[in-house]
Amino acid sequence: DQQVKQNSPSLSVQEGRISILNCDYTNSMFDYFLWYKKYPAEGPTFLISISSIKDKNEDGRFTVFLNKSAKHLSLHIVPSQPGDSAVYFCAAAGTYKYIFGTGTRLKVLA
Amino acid sequence: DAGVIQSPRHEVTEMGQEVTLRCKPISGHDYLFWYRQTMMRGLELLIYFNNNVPIDDSGMPEDRFSAKMPNASFSTLKIQPSEPRDSAVYFCASSRRGQDSNQPQHFGDGTRLSIL
């Protein structure tokens, strides 16, 4: 029973355009949500996070949006660059376990 | 600063053999996590330690799996006996605060385990 879901296993975007990665969760008790990026043969690296009391957090080209009523968060990357090609995991942290989604593979086409 | 160090990077062994994965967390981090990555289930938390003490091992799939942290700079994940379905990438991560906070976890590069 996946409490954190990333329903799109892959996404292709043209360089310079916006990439939108989505994540859904089922448990309202999560306190924070995080996005990690993973390159092949490397461990995941932290990208950006958002508290459950906020609805937006921005860091350079990366913005995370949280819609608590829909139990949905998204990561926007603008503009997308070839170096952004990686697997992106969303994670939820709270009273319960730190739970990751299954990941979305982003490919930015030059 | 040195990151989380895992060894070996790759392990290939036959079914029934004992497998030991090793992890050195970042100095000063008092939380250590073991994860398993598979295509079907993504990143699953197996166990985590706080100040060398196991706090939550409910993610450990079976009694064949065990983990120890004898000191602040070293942890092991052992599988005995190993089975083909244990084949996966195993990650170790560390952080300064617990998993229910905003403090990000720092991951090692993983051990790719193949059980034949």
Image (cartoon, coloured by chain):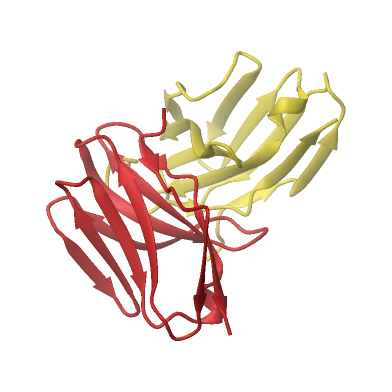
Q: Position of residue A9 (x, y in %)?
A: 52, 52
Q: Nearer the viewer, residue B33 or B26?
A: B33
Query: Is A107 drawn above or below residue A7 in the view shown?
Result: below
Residue A55 point in image, percent of width and height: 16, 60
Chain colored yellow: B
Q: Residue furthest top?
A: B63
Q: Position of residue B110 (x, y in %)?
A: 64, 48
Tell me if residue B27 can be seen: no
Quarter location, residue A96 = top left
Which residue: 55% across, 31% down? B69
- Which residue is at 72% across, 34% downward? B87
* Colour of chain A as rendered: red
Residue drawn 84% across and 23% down? B15
Looking at this view, is A9 or A96 the one in front? A9
The image shows a total of numbered marks equal to 0
Q: Is residue A95 left or right of residue A61?
A: left
The C terminus of chain B lies in which quarter of the figure? top right
User: Viewed as shown, does residue B97 lie left or right of A83?
Assistant: left
From this view, report whether residue B21 is shown above or below residue A76. above
Tell me: A106 left or right of A30.
right
Residue in the foreground of this view, choosing between A34 and B56: A34
Q: Quadrant of residue B14?
A: top right
> Residue A87: x percent and y percent?
54, 59
Residue A88 located left or right of residue B80: left
Q: Residue at x 45, y 79 (%)?
A: A80
Is residue A46 visible in the rendered image? The answer is yes
